[in-house]
Image: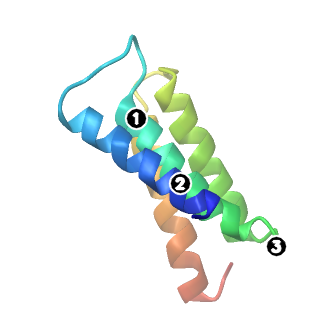
Amino acid sequence: MSFSTLLYILALVAFVLAATGWTYRKTDLLAIGLALWSLGDLIGRLSSLTLTTIILVLAFIAFVAAAVGWRYRKINLIAVGLALWVLSVVLPSLHIG
């Protein structure tokens, strides 16, 4: 079992716990699951630093910030992370990243 697969399994556990309503202090389990999932994708891409990899790193940082409860005005960091993640997926098909 690879490290990426282990991260995906941990993300699944976090998603299931979030879906059942389990909480722990101010941590957002949905954001933890997304951070683990993006890190699993990121590990395979770290060998070559491209624009899409940098954007995925920014998405991971946004998920981690959301997971620990960091807030900036009314900006939803989970939505920011998801937008960055989708951008990292779309850029290669546009031949930009």
Q: Tell me the CA gap for discs 1 and 2.
A: 27 Å
Q: Earlier in the sequence, mark 3 or mark 2?
A: 2
The residue type indicated by label 1 comes to Asn
Q: Which residue lies most toward the left here? A: 20
Task: Give above or below for 70 relative to 82.
Answer: above
Q: Residue at x 35, y 42 (%)?
A: 13
Classify 10 Å Cα crowding around label 1: few (below 14), some (14-19), many (20 and above). few
53 w.r.t. 62: above or below: below
Circles 1 and 2: CB distance less than 8 Å? no
Dividing the picture into quadrants, the one containing residue 65 is top right
* Disc nearer the start of the sequence (1/2): 2
Q: Mark 1 = which residue?
A: 76
Q: Nearer the viewer, residue 52 or 13?
A: 13
Q: Label 3 crowding class (10 Å Cα cut-off): few <14, some 14-19, many 20+?
A: few
Label 3: which secondary element: loop
Going from the N terminus, do you reach mark 3 or mark 1 first?
Answer: 3
Percent x, y of residue 57: 67, 52
Element marked by disc 1: loop
Q: Which residue carries the number 2 mark?
A: 6
Q: Residue at x 56, y 87 (%)?
A: 94
Q: Which mark is residue 44?
A: none
Q: Are marks 3 and 2 in contact (CB under 8 Å)?
A: no
Residue 19 position in % (x across, y down): 20, 37
The residue at which mark 3 appears reads as: 48
How far apart are labels 3 and 1 at the CA level? Answer: 30 Å
Measured in 3D between alpha carbons, the distance from the residue under mark 3 to the one under mark 2, in whole angstroms, is 22 Å
- Please tell me whether mark 2 sits on a helix, a strand or a loop: helix
Residue 51 locus on image (x, y percent): 73, 69
Q: In percent of the image, x 28 and y 34: which residue is there?
A: 17
Q: Are marks 3 and 1 in contact (CB under 8 Å)?
A: no
Estimate the x, y position of residue 29 in percent, counting from the top left. 37, 32
Seen in the picture, residue 73 relative to 14 is either above or below; the reply is: above
